[in-house]
Image: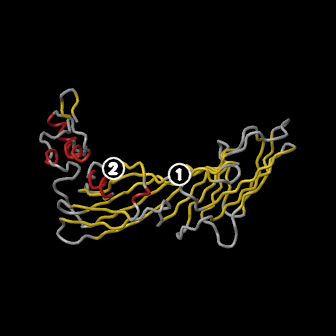
């Protein structure tokens, strides 16, 4: 980067080598020599490299590479139970421990479904533009290779059905949770939470599965965990309105959290990963994970 005619180094890999981390020995030397700078006097070799994001000498390379698909599902369900919006925001995370200067090529089985892509600087843009293939020399260690978005998904893995009715100073609450579209992997860490409406004098809520807690900020947190096979989790109870109020005028929005290990709900699939310029064939591992992002259910 050039700023007012001065070259600036912004690559984290180079900065880590250029600016030494403080330790006890460096502190003692600074006291003895009167110097306070931790910046090295010599530029790292990667400064002149065509792959500045990669260290010139990779130590303790175990000849392994792991690729993880990590997605967040954003959804909005209206009061009638209709799915208004559903999309997945994902990242491709890579953990590389390869010796030398490896050349990696990653391809997807269905690359046409992804939109709004953003790449790490190591990705060559032309192979992606022509064939939707990721060609790159990876940094050493863990990094985010790309981010993307998959729009207009048709369904969600679980459903949340809230029912609220208000009269005579009371609001009856009943919420059911169940599996709508089984992803083939366990759905766990399920949490349903909502903000208690204003002007609520007291709340009496119970669940047939999991625990219900009302926090100091008037947030009701229903921790379900996983959905049992023998019953559908449900929460029910009564909200008592303050004196003088007959009906509840503002109904809450339910926030849903969950996690699915081993599945990418967008449907994105890795076709193959080719690794070249390594002394021997490396070990390659793949994993997928989906969790709820901004998942709202109106009541």
Query: Looking at this view, is 41 or 32 the one in front?
Result: 41
| On screen, residue 238 above or below 224 | above
Q: What residue do we see at 49% from left, 54% from top?
A: 88
Query: Looking at this view, is 124 or 4 the one in front?
Result: 124
Tell me residue 18's x, y (percent).
19, 43
Q: What residue do we see at 16% from left, 56% from top?
A: 57
Relative to residue 187, is residue 250 drawn left or right? right
Q: Which residue is mark 2?
A: 119
On residue 125, the disc is none
The secondary element bearing badge 1 is classed as strand
Q: Residue furthest left?
A: 42
Tell me residue 142's x, y (percent).
32, 56
Badge 1 density bin: few <14, some 14–19, many ≥20, Cα 10 Å:
some
Tag nearer the camera, 1 or 2: 2
Query: Looking at this view, is 23 or 269 the one in front?
Result: 269
Tell me residue 255's x, y (percent).
62, 50
Q: Which residue is mark 1?
A: 293
Q: Which picture quadrant has residue 233?
A: bottom right
């Amino acid at each position: 980067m050039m700023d007012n005619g001065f070259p600036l180094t912004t690559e984290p890999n180079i900065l880590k080598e250029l600016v030494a981390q403080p330790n006890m020995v460096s502190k003692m030397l600074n006291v003895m020599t009167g110097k306070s700078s931790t910046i090295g006097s010599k530029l790292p070799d990667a400064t002149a490299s065509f792959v500045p994001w990669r260290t010139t000498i990779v130590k303790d390379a175990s000849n392994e590479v792991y690729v993880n698909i990590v997605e967040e599902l954003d959804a909005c369900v209206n009061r009638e139970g209709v799915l208004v919006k559903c999309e997945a925001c994902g990242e491709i995370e890579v953990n590389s421990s390869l010796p030398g200067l490896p050349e990696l090529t990653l391809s997807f089985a269905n690359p046409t479904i992804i939109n709004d892509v953003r790449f790490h600087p190591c990705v060559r843009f032309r192979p992606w533009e022509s064939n939707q293939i990721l060609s790159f020399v990876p940094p050493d260690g863990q990094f985010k290779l790309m981010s993307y978005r998959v729009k207009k998904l048709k369904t969600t893995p679980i459903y949340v059905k809230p029912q609220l009715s208000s009269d005579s100073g009371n609001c009856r609450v009943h919420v059911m949770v169940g599996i709508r579209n089984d992803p083939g992997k366990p759905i766990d860490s399920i949490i349903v939470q909502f903000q208690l409406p204003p002007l609520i004098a007291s709340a009496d809520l119970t669940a047939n599965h999991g625990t219900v807690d009302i926090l100091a900020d008037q947030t009701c947190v229903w921790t379900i965990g996983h959905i049992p096979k023998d019953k559908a989790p449900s929460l029910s109870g009564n909200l008592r309105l303050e004196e003088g109020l007959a009906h509840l005028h503002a109904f809450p929005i339910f926030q849903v959290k969950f996690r699915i290990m081993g599945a990418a709900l967008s449907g994105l699939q890795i076709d193959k990963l080719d690794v070249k310029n390594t002394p021997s064939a490396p070990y390659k591992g793949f994993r997928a994970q989906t969790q709820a992002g901004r998942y709202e259910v109106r009541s």
